[in-house]
Amino acid sequence: MWVRARMLGDASEAVLFDQIRPQDVKQGSVGDCWLMAAIAVVAGHPELIKKLFNTNHLTEDGKYVVSMYDAGTHSWTPLVIDEFIPCKLQNGKPVPLFAKPMGEELWAVLLEKAFGKFVYSWGKLEGGDAWYAFQVMTGFKTCVAYTMRKNKWKKKTLKEDWAHGKTENARGRKINYKCFNYDYEQSGQDVNELFEELHRLGTKDYLMSCSWEGANAEAKAKGIVVWHAYSLLEVIEEVRDDGTPQRLMQVRNPWGYHEWKGDWGDSSELWRQNPQLHERLKPKMAGGNDGKAFMSLEDWGISFNALTVCPTIGSHVPVAPATGEGTAEDEAPEGTSRQFIDSDDEADGPKTWIQW
């Protein structure tokens, strides 16, 4: 059934934006972890999220204009969406099939819907690359990725014109690494050199997402989901209470649960042994599951082998039009109005028909 988003909770308390935070993003039953992880990272820059919408509050008619960057045309595209979200009944209550709202705040649910419309269906969000999500939300021209090969992190740069001029651009197909053209660097760096580079960049001015591509029994045993995109929220140079240097990475699973369970995770004894460090970083201890967790650089380096880095400096996010009047809604190409969502991936739920 289709339910107006503000009716999923207390309609009198519903808002478009409250505190825009990574924990507002929670993945549903379509395999768009690449998108949800990217949205959670951008949520660390609330001004970028707000500029995508034409308003800062819920509208009376429940319609919004969301602007998204189309690399195929080198232009921003305004999309008109409404608040109706596909739901299933669970214990007699409607529950969204896809992104879940955090409390009464609706921006993340509506942003995922806008992405679904941008690529013509939720089905086409199944499997993708965080690069593309970052580009659509920021309008960046190039970005950098790192891939670990033989314990060396090798850099590759997305070519600026990867989609321009193609007859079938990104909007009409699934987005993954096969869609992109890269310039590769032959030399590599170890994980400590990579950390120093990322620490210089800082997460204040750069968006970062990471994943492990392939099998990794050791990481999986400690809570890492392979072939699954995570937000990289912080790159931290710290010291333990005894003065020992400590490098930490904070990652977030876009599911909003199923966290890292090793050293420096929420339940790690290391926090109790370092109360001063705990006070500075304020991790959530056991029972505060929100998908976020700290981990040491060493553990991060053997749990992830792919990294995406996108600048926010130089992003040209427009202020969306004030209303949807006079804005042509994009129509899905023939044959795509009905999409089948189907996957064996752990992140996905049962097969579901979606009528756009």
Image: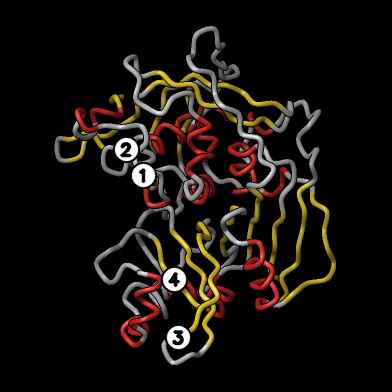
- Name the residue that disc number 4 marks: 294
Of callouts 1 and 3, which one flags the residue occurring earlier in the amino acid sequence?
Answer: 1
Which circle, 2 or 1, is nearer the viewer?
Answer: 1
CA–CA distance between discs 2 and 4? Answer: 26 Å
Residue 39 location in percent, x, y? 50, 45
Element carrying mark 1? loop
Element carrying mark 2? loop
Element carrying mark 3? loop
Q: Amino acid at mark 2?
A: Glu
- Name the residue that disc number 3 marks: 240
Q: Quadrant of residue 320?
A: top right
User: Do the residues under discs 4 and 3 have CB atoms within 8 angstroms?
Assistant: no
CA–CA distance between discs 2 and 3? Answer: 37 Å
Classify 10 Å Cα crowding around label 3: few (below 14), some (14-19), many (20 and above): some
Of callouts 2 and 1, which one flags the residue occurring earlier in the amino acid sequence?
Answer: 1
Classify residue 37 as left or right of residue 17.
Answer: right
Placement of 27 over or under 75, stated as above or below: below
- Name the residue that disc number 1 marks: 19
Which circle, 4 or 3, is nearer the viewer?
Answer: 3
Classify 10 Å Cα crowding around label 2: few (below 14), some (14-19), many (20 and above): many
Q: Among all residues in the image, which is located at the extreme left?
A: 92
Residue occupying the point 71% across, 70% down: 153
CA–CA distance between discs 2 and 1? Answer: 8 Å
Q: Quadrant of residue 271?
A: bottom left
Residue occupying the point 21% across, 35% down: 9
Of callouts 4 and 3, which one flags the residue occurring earlier in the amino acid sequence?
Answer: 3
Q: Among all residues in the image, which is located at the extreme bottom?
A: 242
